Amino acid sequence: MVQQVTEGVKIMVETYYQPGQSNPINSQYLFAYRITIENLTIYPVKLVSRHWHIIDSNGTHREVEGEGVVGMQPVIGPGDTYQYTSAANLQSDMGKMYGSYLMENLFNKKKLRIAIPEFQLITPAKMN
């Protein structure tokens, strides 16, 4: 698990290769990732949008932007956590992702750019 704290918001990431939904013969590898967001501040924050960099070991680099996460724009109270699971397709058996969330401090309406730490997407066979 990787983790990082930015502006009092802690991001933790766990990854899981999905062999049953992958097709290595056709260079299709699916990885799930679970993100836990913990609000360490004294004010509520709202997750407004996300910006991802997805990089395959074959050199492919994609960027994905959008509102919220998995169709939600959660409000996370002081000391609370929010967790969601999503997935990414790669064209190779190794890659990485990193990015950021745009959040809003609901107390003073200040926008916060929260870093999502870089995490590796590697099939178990590559780790041996």
Image: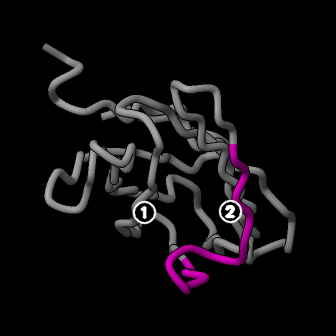
Q: How far across and down, in percent of the image, does residue 99 sit?
A: 65, 45
Whether residues under marks 1 and 2 lie with C-beta atoms below 8 angstroms apart, the answer is no
For the N terminus, which image quadrant?
top left
Q: Name the residue rendered at 64%, 71% in the picture.
A: 47
Q: Earlier in the sequence, mark 1 or mark 2?
A: 2
Q: Residues within 10 Å of mark 1 (few under 14, many from 20)?
A: few
**Segment colored magenta:** 62-75
**Of 100 and 92, which appears nearest the observer?**
92
Q: Quadrant of residue 35?
A: bottom left
Q: Residue furthest top?
A: 128
Is 72 placed left or right of 89 in the picture? Answer: right
Q: Residues within 10 Å of mark 2 (few under 14, many from 20)?
A: some
Element class at badge 2? strand
Is 128 placed left or right of 83 in the picture? Answer: left
Residue type pointed to by label 1: Gly
Q: Is residue 71 magenta?
A: yes
Real-space CA distance between mark 1 and mark 2, rounded to the nearest whole angstrom: 21 Å
Residue type pointed to by label 2: Arg
Q: Return the residue at label 2.
A: 50
Is 15 placed left or right of 77 in the picture? Answer: left
Rendered position, 122 above or below 41: above
Q: Return the residue at label 1.
A: 79
**Of 88 and 33, which appears nearest the observer?**
88
Element class at badge 1? loop
Between disc 1 and disc 2, the foreground one is 2
Q: How far across and down, in percent of the image, does residue 60 sit?
A: 65, 35
Q: Is residue 111 magenta?
A: no
For the C terminus, which image quadrant?
top left
Q: Name the residue rendered at 66%, 51% in the picture.
A: 52
Q: Name the residue rendered at 57%, 80% in the picture.
A: 75
Q: How far across and down, in percent of the image, does residue 29 sit?
A: 34, 47
Q: How many marks?
A: 2
